[in-house]
Image (tube, rainbow, N blue to C red):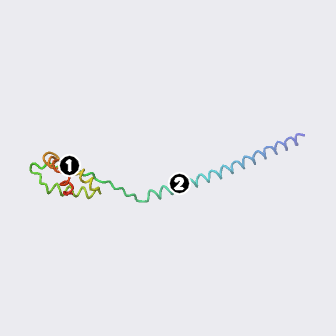
Amino acid sequence: MKVSKFIRRLATVKMSMEAEADNAEEMRAELEARRQQMKDLLEKQEAAAATPVTVVVQRERRLRSFSGSGADPVNDWIEDARAMISAQGLTAREVADYLVSHLEGPARREIRCRPPEDSRQSQ
């Protein structure tokens, strides 16, 4: 009887080891799948890092105000204003508002005192 008990015990151990082997095989397969996923992700990241990225940072350049008094030549201010306007792509109304916002003192008073017809003609 001891032999039959031993054989039954041996059969139980064998079944347990087979189950453990199946479990280990499933774990190996899952591990291999995870490794492949990790490899794919790393390849994508390397490809993205190798792709050059162009970043354009527009320098903020400001138009200085014009007052019409002093040694500030109007032609220089007009040239600067034209350069700023062309770089911004504004509508006619936006251009007018932009230019008036950069006038001060006598120059601003002159523009504000003009009748609307004169303002439209100067555009």
Label placed on residue 35 = none
Q: Residue at x 19, y 54 (%)?
A: 117
Query: How many C-alpha atoms fall within 10 Å of the one at disc 1: few (<14), some, or many (≥20)?
Result: some
| Front one among 63 and 21 | 63
Per the image, label 1 sits on a secondary structure element best described as loop
Q: Nearer the viewer, residue 21 or 86?
A: 86
- Which percent across, then down, holds residue 82? 21, 58
The residue to which callout 2 is attached is: 41
Question: Marks 2 and 1, how far apart in space?
Answer: 53 Å
In the shown orientation, is residue 106 left or right of residue 42?
A: left
**Residue visible at 23% across and 50% down in the picture:** 62
Instruction: Pinpoint residue 121: horizontal percent, then vertical percent.
Output: 19, 57
At x 86%, y 40%, the residue is 5
Rendered residue at 74%/47% (across/down): 19
Q: Badge 1 is on which residue?
A: 102
Amino acid, disc 2? Leu
On the rendered structure, is 1 left or right of 102? Answer: right
Left or right for 49, reference 57? right
Q: Quadrant of the C terminus?
A: bottom left
Image quarter (top left, top right, bottom left or bottom right) of the N terminus: top right
Say what secondary structure mark 2 lies in: helix
Q: Position of residue 105 (x, y in %)?
A: 14, 45
Query: Closer to the observer: label 2 or label 1?
Result: 1
